[in-house]
Amino acid sequence: MGRGGARSRVTPREGRGNEGKGAGPPLVSPAPSHRAPHLPLVREGSAAPLRPPLPSPGWVPPQERAAGPRMAAVPPGDGEHALPYGGEVLVLWLAAAGAGAGAGRAEAAAELRVRRMALGAGRFAHRSSGAFGVGGRQRDAGIVCCGCATHSPTGVVLPCVLLRRKKRSDAVKYLLLSLHGSNRFELSCQFELDYELKEDVRLFGGPSVLWRHADRLFYISPDTRTVLSAPVQLSSVVWAGEIEGEGTVVLGVRTARLQESEAEDELSTSDRAIWGTEFFGYAIEAQKMLASTCFMPHAYSRVVSSVHVCKSEMLKEQLRTSVIAVTHKNQLIWFQDGRPKGVCELPYEKPCSIKTAVTSGNRLLLIVSFASGNICVVRSENLQVASKWQKVTSVLVDDFVGSGTEQLLLLFKDDSNADLLNTFKITDLGRVNYESGINYEDDVPAAEGLQENGLLTIQALEKRLQAGLTSVRELQQHLGLKKRVLTESCRALIDLVEERSHVLPTAKKEGLVSLWDDVENPPHSLSKETSSTSKVPDHFVEKLWQRVVGESLVVGVKLTESFYLSLSDVSLSLVVDQDFSSISPIIECRNKIIKLNKAFSALSVSSCQIEPPPKKMKLDLHSKNDLKKEVHKKCSNIHLEGAKTVTAVTSLSPLLAFHCVCCVVLLHAKKQKHQNDGLQKSKKITLLCGKILLSLEDISNGKYSVKMLRDSSYCTGSMEDILAVLAASMRFSFQIQSSDFTLTSVNSWLLGEMECTPFKECHDHIFCHKAGNVYGTVFNWTLKSPFEGILTLFCRSLTVLFQCLHSLTRVLPPSCDVKLLKSGSKGVLTVQLALALEKEMLTSQTSLSSKESKAENSLTRQNEPGKNISDAPVASLLDSEDKVQQFRMKLQNEREESVLNMNQTMNGTLYQEMALKIAEAQLSSDMIVWRLSKS
Amino acid sequence: MKRRRGAAPEPGCLRAWAAESKALAGRWRAARCAGPRGAEAAARQQRGAFGELLLRMRGLPAALPALPLELTVVYNSLLFVMGTSDRVVEGEAEGIRQGLLRVLEACGSSGQDLSTEELWQKVLQEVTDEELRAPLHRLAALQAAWWLATSRLRSVTGLFQLLSSAEDSGRAPCSRGENELLALLKAWRVPAKGASTSLVQSAENLKETLCTAAAFLQGLQELEAGNLPAALSLLQKAAGGFCSKRVLAQIYTCLGCCAQQMGKPQTALQHLKRALQVDFQCLPALSHVAAVYQELGETDAELQALGLLYEALEKNPPSAASFSPYFLIRTELLVHTPILTSLLRRRQPSEVKYLLAQRCLQEGRVADAVEHYLDFLAVLQEGLQQQVPLDGGSALPRIPEAFLEAASALEQDGRHRDAITLCEEVISRTTDLIPRALLLVEEGLEQPESPSPGMGLAGGLLSQKRESLHCLTWRAASYLACDTAGKVLPCHTTSPPPMCLVCDPAASSYLIQALWKLNQKQEAAAHWQKHLERPTGEDGQQEGQGRPFPLYLVSCVKQAAFPQRESLARSIQDYLRSTSQDPFS
C-alpha cells in the first residue's frame, strides 16, 4: 500500500506545461522540481507523443493521498504514486484534462493518468499510458491510496486506486478503480461519506476498501458494495489480508476486555491484564470475530505499528502463522505461531511499514520503511540489518530485471531532478545491483554474496566435522571393546596353558578379607583376661544424667578428669534393677564418647598480631617444619575440654512398657597401670555408677526432654542437652576439599540458609533452627586450610542427611571434592598408625631385651665399645680411609653378634607371653591400617 | 465463590519469558560443570541468549508485573557480560541504568537526566513494590561490583546505605573502628531465594565476592596511603573471604608487603610463604621474600630465594589468565589498582639474574657474582627486546653500568683481561657520545630545581647534559677500571680520568690528589678549600657512606683509598700558608 514517506516538496505546477520541449531523456514524468532552470529539460514533453490519444479534460492538480493529517497538508502537485505490477512500475497521478491551459487549470476536470515504465538499458523506459476521467474539478480530487488487489469478477490481481472527490456539499465521494492490462480503468465501486478517509485505509480483494473512523471499523462489502461497520471498538488496524479458510481478515488493536476471572485476579500474569490492550481478528466475509493469539501475544498490541503476515495455513484445524511486526520500540520481531522467535533492533526511529521480498535462493528480505524516509533491509535468516538507505521516497518490490526472483526498487529523493524514476537503485542484496544510469550486470560480485558463500561453506564444513567426530567416537568405542576382549582372551589363554580354570581376578580385596577373619577369631589368650577389681577412687562419678531425645533414651556419666584419663575402652551398660522374669535384665545400648571443645574454637588464633621470633622462621625455612602447626597445637591444647562424659543410647519404647523402671548403670573400662619399664598394662574393671529411674509420668512432664533455645546469636542448652542430642544422632563426617576457591561459602550456608547458631557452651558445634525436617541437626565445620575442611553432621535420619547434602552442594564452589570419612580423618589415622607401629616396634624390642636379661645364655660380649656405632656421628667416622676401615670392622662385628644372638633359646612361658604382646600390638596396627584403607 | 475458567488462558509473554529465563539458567548450570573450555563457549552463547531475551522484553512497554523478571534477566545478562570479558568496562553497566529507567517508567516517573547514583536513590526511595525488592537488591549488588571494579567506593557505600536504610532503620550502625563499607556489605541481607533457580550466580556468592573485593581494594588503598595498620586489618579480612587460590595468594603477598613496611619482617615472611603455599605461580611473593631477607641481612637466604625465583621464571613462562567461568563475577575482575599491579609485578628472568649478580658483588661473593654477570650478559646478547622491561619498576640499570659492574666483578676475581675487554666495550660505545667540553656541569647539577621562565628548554638541555655526564662517568670509570686492571691505555691524555670526577663531591679528593700530583698546586688548593667548605654531611663520605659510590667504582675506590690523605692535607695546608696569610685561623 502506498508509500512510506511523505514528500514535502513544493512544486511549481507551471513546469507541467512544457510539453514537447527540449531533448530530455525519454523517461519523463510530471515529477516536479524546485529549480526552475532545469524544468524545461525534464518535462514530459518528449513523453507526450508516446501517450495514446486520450481525451484530455484539462489539467487538474493531483493530490496527495489522504493517509493522515500530516499527509493531507502536503500541497497538491506532489501526487505521483508508483506501484509495481508485473515487473513494471506504474506511475499514477491526477492531471487536468486538457493540460496546458493556464488560468482555468484548477477549475478543469480531473483525469487519472497512468504510465507504465519498464527497465531497459539501465533505466526505466515508458511503455504505455492510460487515463480515466474522474469528473469534477482537479483541485477537489485526489488519490487516497493505490495497491494491488484481487479483482473478483476475473480472479486476477490488478492494480487499484482509491480516488477522492469533494462535492459541493460537505460530502466526499470515493471512487475505487481497477486498472486492466489494456490501460483501461474500471470503476469497481463508488460511495459517499460525510468525512474524509484518513486512518488505516486499506484495499483488499474485490477490490474493496476498509478504513477506521471514530474508533470504528468500516468497510465496503465486496458482495453488496455498501458501507458496513464491524461490531468492534478499535484503536488501530495493523494488518488486513487473506487468511486461508477465513477470507479477508483484519487484525486490529483494542482495549483489553478482561475475562471475569482475569479481572478478579489481581496477580494475573496474562498479557491483557498487564498491558491493557489486545489484538482482535475480524473476518470480513463471515462477519465474525476470530481468535487472534495465533498471530502475536497480546502484549505486543501496545507497541506494534505494522504487521506483515508471511504465511498462514490451517493445519489440523489450527491456524499456523509466521508474522513479522515492527514496533514503536524500534524493533522488528518475527513471530511463529504466535510466539516471538527473533528480534532485530532497527537502526532508525519510528518504523511505519513493512514489506517482504523473495530474492534469489528463496531468501526472504524484510524491508522496513521509517517515517523519516529511511529504509532498512533485514535478512530473515538471521534477523540482522543487511542494508539501509536514507532519503528514500518509496521502495517497491517486484521482479524488475526479469531474473525470476524479486528485487527492491528504491526511489530516492532527488532535488535536482524532477523525475520520480530518475534516481533509483535496484538490488536484491545479492547478485542484482543496478543504480540509476549505471549497469552493473553481474560483474561486481556483491560483498554480501561472498559472505553468504563463506557462511554456506562453513556450514558444510561443520557438518562434515560433526560427521567425522561421530565416526571417530564410534571407532574409539569399538577399539575399546576389542581391546577388552583381547585382554580377557589372553588371560583365558594363559590360564588354559597353565591348566587353571579361568576366573576373573578379584585379587585387590583379598588382604582385607583375611583381616576380617582375624578380627572374628581373636586369639584365645586375649579373652582370657578377666575383669578384676583394681584400685579405684571413691568418688569418680561427677554426674549421672538421662535425657529423652525422640525415640531414644540417653544416659550419660561424667567422670572425674583424673580418673577418666587413667581409663581406656570405656563403655556403659544398663541393667534393669527389678526382677522381670520375662525379659533379659541387660538392656541393649550403643555407647558413645563425644569430644567437645569447650569455649572458643582454635581457629580464632589465626590473626596473631605479635611478630614471631625469627629463630622459628629460620628453622621453618630449612626443615620445612610448619610453625603454624606448632602454634595451632598449643592453642588447641589450651582449650581442649577433655572428653569426660560417656553416654549410652537405647531405644526408649521397650522400657516404657514397664511404666516405671529402674536401671543400674555400670561402667566398663580398662584401667591402665604404669609400669617401671614404661610399658602400660591394663586391667578390665567394672564399676557401679548409680541408678536411673524412668517413669512415663516424668517423660510426659518433659522432665528429661532437651531444651534448645535460640538466644540472639547463640543456642542455649546445657552441656548434657548437647551431649544427649549428639549421642542420639547419626554422625557423618565429610572431608570437603576445594581445588580452586576458598570454602567460605560453607560457613555462610550454615549461618544463612540453614539458620544455624552456635551453642553457647561449645562454639564449634552449631545447631540448625531451620523449620522442617532438618531442625535439630547439629553441625561442626572445621577448616584445616582455606581450601580444606571437615563438616560433621549429627542428624536424626538419613533423609535429613541427604537433604542437608543436597542443599550444601548448591553452594559449594566448583571442582569440590566431598568425601565421606568413614572412620576418622586420614590425618588422625595416619598419626595413630605411626604410634601403633612405634608401639609394635617397642613391644618386640622390650620383650626381646627382657628375654636377653633372663636368658641363661652365657655368650660373652665382644667388642663392647663397638655397641655404639649408631650413636657416634657417622660422618666423622668416614673422614679418612683408615676410619672407614675401622667402621667396616665394627659393622662386621655387630652383624656377627646379631647372628649369634639369633641362635639363642628361651623358655616356653616367656615366649608365649612375648608372642601375645606382639600379636596384640600387631592387631592394633592392623586395625588402623584397615580403617585407613577404608577411609 | 464463582470463578469461571474459560478455555485455558493463553500462555502470555510473561510466563513464556519466565520459562525461557529459567531454562537458560538451567542450561548454564549444566554447562559450567563441563570444564573450562566448554563452559567458556557456553558462557558466550548464554551472553547472547540472555541479551536477546532482554531485547525482546524491552520491546514492550515497562509493566510492573513483568519487571521482577526483567530485572532478573538484566542481572543474568550483565553477569555474562562481565564474566566473559577480561576486565570490567564501565559502559557495559548501561544495562543497569536501563533497568532502573524501566522501573521508573512503569511507576509513571522518569529519571533520564539523573546520574546513576541519583537514579538508584530515586528508585529505592520511590519504588515500594514488594515484588521488586529482591530483584532490585540483586541488581544493586551487581552495580556495586561495577563500581568496585572502577574503584568508586564512595558510590558503593552510598548505595548500600540506601539499601540498608530501605531495609530497616532499626539496625545498629557499624561499631566504631570497623570499616563502614564492609560493615554495610556484611549487614546487607541477601534477598530471599525466591528466584534462585533462574539466577546464574547466586546473590549470596556475589555478596561474598563483593566483601572480599571491597576489603582487598580498601586494604590496597590504605597501603598506598601509608596507613599500614588499617591496611593490614583490611587485607586480613580479605584473606578470610571467598576467593580463588590465585587471589588468595595475591592477598597474602600484599599482606607480606604490608608487614614488611610495618617493620615486621618475620610476619612478612610468614605471609609470603603462605602465598606460595596457596599458589606457587604467585612468583612476585618470592621476589618480596628476597627483599625481606635482604632487609634482614640474611644474604644466603636472599640469594637462595632469588635463585629459586630465577629457576621458577625459567620453567614457567607467564601464562594468560585462564578462564574459570564457574563464577561469572570473581574478585580478580573487581580489583584493579596500580599499586596491586606494581606489587605483583612479575620480574623478568634477566632482571632476577642481574639482581643475583649485583647482590653477590655487593656482598663480596665475587666468584658467584662473575658467574651471574656472565649469565646476565649472555641473556642480554640473546635478545634484549624481549628480556628487558622498559617500565620504571625494572631493577635493571643502564647497560654500560651493568657492563662496568661485570667488569668490576671480573677484575676482583682476578680476570683482568676479561675486565679490560668489557671496559673497552664501554669506551668504544661511548666515544661518540662524549662532548668536547662539558661546561656548567656543577651549576646545572646543583640547582636543578631553580625556577626560571625557560624551564622546559633548560630541563631538556639539562637532561642532555646529564646524559653526556653519564657517558663521561662511564667512560672514565672504564679507564679507571682498566687502570686498576693493570693496563695503561694510551688515551689517558685525551680524556683524563680525574676530570670526570669533578661532578661527584665524593670524588673530589681524587681530583685534589691528581692535581697535586700534576703539580697544579694552585688549583689543587682551590679545590681543597672548596672541599672543606662543603657541609659536613657531604664531607664525611670518604668511605662510601651517605651518597655511595656506584657499585662499579667501589672496588676501585677501595684500592685507591687515600693512603696519603693526611700527608696530602698537610702539604696543601703548608702550601696555602705559604701563599696566603693563613686562611684557616
Image: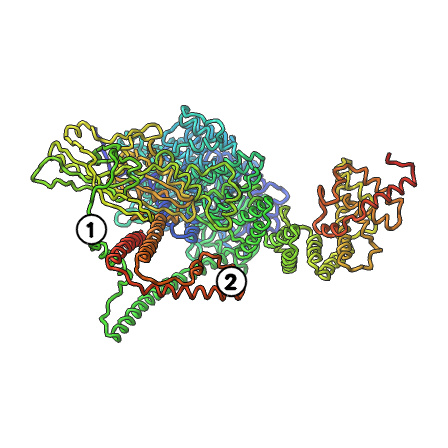
Residue B499 in the image: above or below residue A77: below
| Earlier-in-chain disc, 2 versus 1 | 1
- Residue visible at 41% across and 38% down in the picture: A635
* Three-letter code, disc 1: Ser
- Secondary structure beneath disc 1? helix
Q: Nearer the viewer, mark 2 or mark 1?
A: 2
Quarter holding the N terminus of chain B is: top left
Q: Residue B197: x, y in percent? A: 34, 41
* Three-letter code, disc 2: Leu
- Foreground of the two, A210 or B578: B578
- Foreground of the two, A587 or A866: A866
Mark 1 sits on what residue?
Answer: A527
On the question of residue B256 being in view, the answer is no
Q: Is A585 displayed left or right of B514 in the figure? A: left
Q: Residue B239: x, y in percent? A: 47, 40
Q: Residue A6: x, y in percent? A: 50, 39
- Secondary structure beneath disc 2? loop
Mark 2 sits on what residue?
Answer: A878
Quarter holding the C terminus of chain B is: top right
